[in-house]
Amino acid sequence: MGESMVARSLDDNARLAREELDSAPSEFLPARERESAGNREVFGRTGLRQGGSGQPGPPDTATKILGRTWPQPFAVGLPAGPVRPEDELDVVRAAGRTGLPVLVGAFTGLAALAAATDGPLWLRLPAGGDRDTMRDLARSAEAAGFEALVLTPGPGRPAGDGAGAADLAWLRSVASLPLLVAGVRTAADAVLALERGADGLVAEELATLPSIAAAVAGRVPVLLYGGVRRGADILVSLATGADAVLLDRPVLEGLVVGGREGVAEVLEALAAELAGALAFTGTGSAADAGPELLRTAPGPVPTAAAVPGAVAKAAAARGGAGDADLSKADLHTSVSDPVLDTMNFLNEVTHRYPDAISFAPGRPYDGFFDTEEIFTHIRRYLDHLAEQGSSARQIRTAMYQYGPTAGQIREIIADSLRADENIDVPAASIVVTVGAQEAMLLVLRALLSGPDDVLLVASPCYVGITGAARLLDLTVTAVEEREEGFSCADLEAAILRERALGRRPRAFYVIPDHSNPSGTTMSTDTRTELLDIAERHGILLLEDSPYRMVSPGTPLPTLKSLDRARSVVHLGSFAKTVFPGARVGFAVADQRVVDDSGRTSLLADELAKIKSMVTVNTSSLSQAAVAGTLLAAGGRVSELNSEAAAHYGEAMRATLASLDAHLPAARREALGVRWNEPTGGFFLTLNVPFRADNEALTRSAQEYGVIWTPMAYFHPQGGGHHGIRLSTSYLTTAEIEEGTARLVRFITDQSARS
């Protein structure tokens, strides 16, 4: 142990140390890892909910255990088997730099360990040993300045059985140091340990931690030991009821890779990750962690009944009994729907494994953005207003006041649509929205009015539309794409089936060009046939079009440009083409609406009414930035994005080429792996022979350093369990090459496992 090379990250440590640790000549470590496996599985299913910004400044990670304040809510608890005395000294010295406690064995001289650190030391005493030896060790530890004793049970035995319970009562009578009991697995163990005089407990299982914490009710500290490898794991443990955790595997990996400095880097990395996790959840301090931070993927947050210890701990911290807590059952059922948690889970995985290469985010490449250009764009729009005859006062009002609900740049958007997309509609038929997501919400709210109304969606489907439908309690019916693409016959069959059931299909949502998530593009013939079906059956087509202008080559005509019967509501966004931070989208809704008296309006007018009760208006400043950008390009978004489109096309080709190089045809056929080959857009999909779920994603991120998106997220009525979505837009060519190599290693190993 203790090579000179120092690992750069926790992921590097794990990879570099795995071979040596997995073959360690010890019976203890494999057993310890088996015991930790259950906790790893629970950690893999349990995530953190993204919260607000919380209090200003860095979060407070300090905790107070047995009268001493620790800088972090974790201590070092190396397993006894594979560690040599000199290695234990390295760990003690590294932890001593930060004042963190270390749980040590008795095979290194206690005085030498105490001399190596100013930090707290705890001594491990195995139950069932010779009592004279145990007494002498306890007294020697006290004389050397140790701060606690930890009674550890034999393998497979909880703290409260047999010799463990007897030793606990006896040791309490002969030792004056605080005494913690390890191996606690149930609430009954905890109660027995308290009755025998324990000053603290070390729980073994995350799954039973809530009941243990509830039984303790804050009388003594509870630490979790086993399976903790990341800063997010530490916060999950605190939110589940622990006061702190004991670390072993990551510290051991740091020791193997880099000796004392490697351990120091691990502890620093874990502290940084914990601070990041607290900031991610909007939590000001470790002491404030409670069950409201938890998200159990893909289900709901644990209720108060499920996490009683954590609830009691949170209530005690507030100085009350939790009377003001809300019941999840009383909230709208959509907040417990997995579809609303999918993006949060991906964000949390990305946050938890910052060194992983991520094929998950479907966002533009940062390299095309220049901060100073924002001011240029806004100035250009202000000059445009002046050229149009607006006074200085009118320009000030346009920028500083709310502005018209339907938007103040509708004419500029209409000109751009005519120039670039051959969509010729009056500006009055456009509503400027807060991203395309608001446009979806407005359209769904307007069109689906009764309990028998149904939204049809092409599946796999962008989660934003199904999430919006869930918020509005709308019925969604999926029309599954075939492997060769979307079939209009399947849509027509779905329409007839819904009507046979007494329901009214109102609209069909589709992304015809380089769709999210599948990456497929609808042919010209299919577009024509789709418009014919919509007209014959009296349904509207909701055409989403975010990826057309960020793809190389000449795009096929939009559905709206081919629309002669006003059957298409076109949903647009400037997130991919201008910049996402502006949050500007739009809806083209030129359908006529007739009221009972025969008066007509545009559907856009009705959408604006709804918008006035949702966001009032879209940010005037954001509209100005987008309008200035469009004006600079003469309305031609295609020209504005020509360089970006070439980049994204190259990124897609590089990904496909790298996949082909690492998984040539014969090898992928043997594995049962295949993928599609989009010509543009941000996404492509792989099919794999194993279940590509959250657990597989977590393993991929943790052990292989690569992140992707499970396709099951995008199938609103089930399916996609063997699919992976890859986003190619946000990565450099070098990152694509390395990320693809990691992904192929993961796929190969996971396929062998399955």
Image (cartoon, helix red, strand yellow):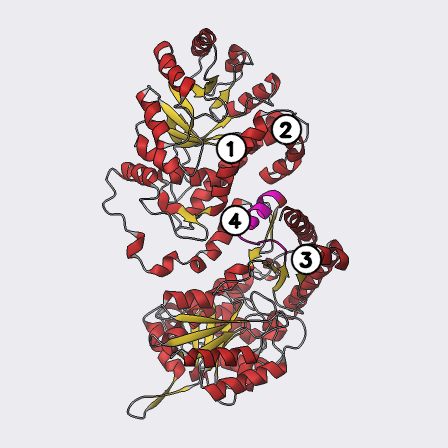
Q: Find out whether residue 701 is within the magenta segment.
A: yes
Q: What element carries label 2?
A: helix
Q: Could you classify mark 3 by the number of other residues whose Cα lies within 10 Å: few (under 14), some (14-19), or many (20 or more)? A: few
Return the residue at label 3: 672
Circles 1 and 4 in contact, beta carbons < 8 Å: no
Kindly tell me whether residue 27 is visible in this rendering: yes
Q: Residue 35 carries which label?
A: 1
Q: Could you classify mark 2 by the number of other residues whose Cα lies within 10 Å: few (under 14), some (14-19), or many (20 or more)? A: many
Q: Residue 349 carries which label?
A: 4
User: In the rendered structure, which amino acid carries the disc numbered 3?
Assistant: Gly
Distance Cα–Cα, label 1 vs label 4: 24 Å
Q: Residue at x 56, y 65 (%)?
A: 517
Single out the mark in the foreground, 1 or 4: 1
Q: Is mark 3 on a helix, strand or loop?
A: loop
Figure quadrant of residue 60: top left
Prevailing secondary structure of the magenta residues? helix
Query: Which of pointers 4 and 3 lies earlier in the amino acid sequence?
Result: 4
Task: Tell me: residue 490, above or below residue 650.
Answer: below
Q: What stretch is highlighted in magenta?
A: 688-703
Return the residue at label 2: 256
Query: Which of pointers 1 and 3 lies earlier in the amino acid sequence?
Result: 1
Distance Cα–Cα, label 1 vs label 2: 21 Å
Where the N terminus falls, by quadrant? top right
Query: Which of pointers 2 and 4 lies earlier in the amino acid sequence?
Result: 2
Circles 1 and 2 in contact, beta carbons < 8 Å: no
